[in-house]
Amino acid sequence: MVWALREAGHEVTGADVHLASTVPAGAGLSSSAALEVVVALALNDLFGLGLRGWQLARLCQRAENVYVGAPVGIMDQTAAACCEDGHALFLDTRDLSQRQIPFDLAAEGMRLLVVDTQVKHSHSEGEYGRRRAGCEKGAALLGVDALRDVPYAELDEALARLGDEEEVRRLVRHVVTEDERVERVVSLLESGDTRAIGPVLVEGHVSLRDDFRISCPELDLVVDTSLAAGALGARMTGGGFGGPRSSWRRRGTWSRSPRRSRRPSRRPVSRPPGCSRRCRRRGAAGALSGGPRPAQASRLVSVYSVIPGG
């Protein structure tokens, strides 16, 4: 972050930084973005830079893209820097416009459960970059700047134009349908019909599993188990290939899901998951992305790894 701030023309020197965190690294809970943003906030305060949250988020992304070499987008950093308690952040990654969408599960007698599959993932190992490149190829073949420019109503026609590019077809289908799901979730939340977004999350997980192909047996098992135990909705969150999934439940049905998630299964899994009801931090309530990040890659999440309330 010091490098990114200096490159942007801000006069910062060194600093002794002591970190304490409850965010598990490599679990899909945006630990890298959390680290970047908290250091950026500290340096911003220490040196009186006067930068706003969205500006810090952009600098954090540049530090990860250029200095670290990870081709990540802007959503995680913006969520960490700009989210507000009791809301989901609706972010358009093209123009970085934001809206705070009411999302207070506790007030409606619900809770969000985050389950860590204990399977680690890494953006720098190539899979994220491969999918980003595939999305870029799809946009080029369809003659659009980004896959968000493909109207949902014209998806079938667009897929037909891609011919036998099966992998690209899957990626395009996921991005276009996921953008539509995000808009549906925003509409439901703004109308006060929070419970109705549960099935939309399940649709998203199926698309991430079958089309974007970034799920894994552990994630699928926990999603299936949560739904069988009465969850209103469940899906993976984060970058995929492991990490957590999010689900929410009516109060009073809480204790069943963690126990059932640890039961033996015939499906091949590496280790039992870990469950959490608390993941509170300054300003964090959720993030919704209104379109893929710059270029085409989509790792959209409808509810982002946070449990409101106690």
Image (cartoon, grey):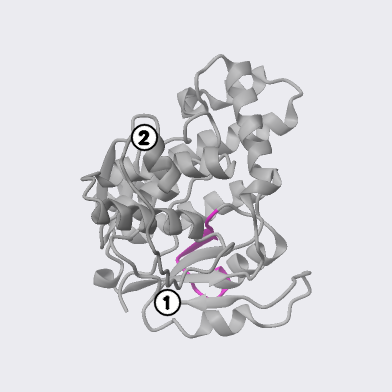
- Give me the residue at 48% from left, 35% from top: 292
Q: Amino acid at mark 2?
A: Ala
Secondary structure under the numbered disc 1 in the rendered image: loop
Q: Residue at x 50, y 56 (%)?
A: 32
The residue at the point 44 percent across, 71 percent down is: 21
Spot occupied by residue 115 in the image (x, y as percentages of width and height): 54, 71
- Determine the residue positioned at 37% across, 45% down: 57
Q: Is 39 in front, or is 287?
A: 39
Task: Characterize the local packing of mark 1: few (<14), some (14-19) or many (20 or more) Cα atoms within 10 angstroms.
Answer: some
Q: Residues within 10 Å of mark 2 (few under 14, many from 20)?
A: few
| Quarter of the image where one finds residue 291 | top left
| Residue assigned mark 1 | 277
What residue did someone put label 2 on? 8
Q: Are marks 2 and 1 in contact (CB under 8 Å)?
A: no
Q: Which residues are magenta?
A: 227-238
Amino acid at circle 1: Arg
Q: Position of residue 61 (x, y in %)?
A: 45, 42
Q: Tell me, yes or no, whether the highlighted magenta stretch contains residue 188.
A: no
Q: CA distance from mark 2 to mark 1?
A: 39 Å
Task: Say if residue 183 shows up in the picture.
Answer: no
Indicate left or right for 152 with 159 as reference: left
Is residue 234 rendered magenta in the image? yes
Percent x, y of residue 54: 30, 42
Relative vertical location of residue 282 with respect to residue 239 in this rendering, above or below: below
Residue 108, quarter of the rendered image: bottom left
Residue 111, picture quadrant: bottom left
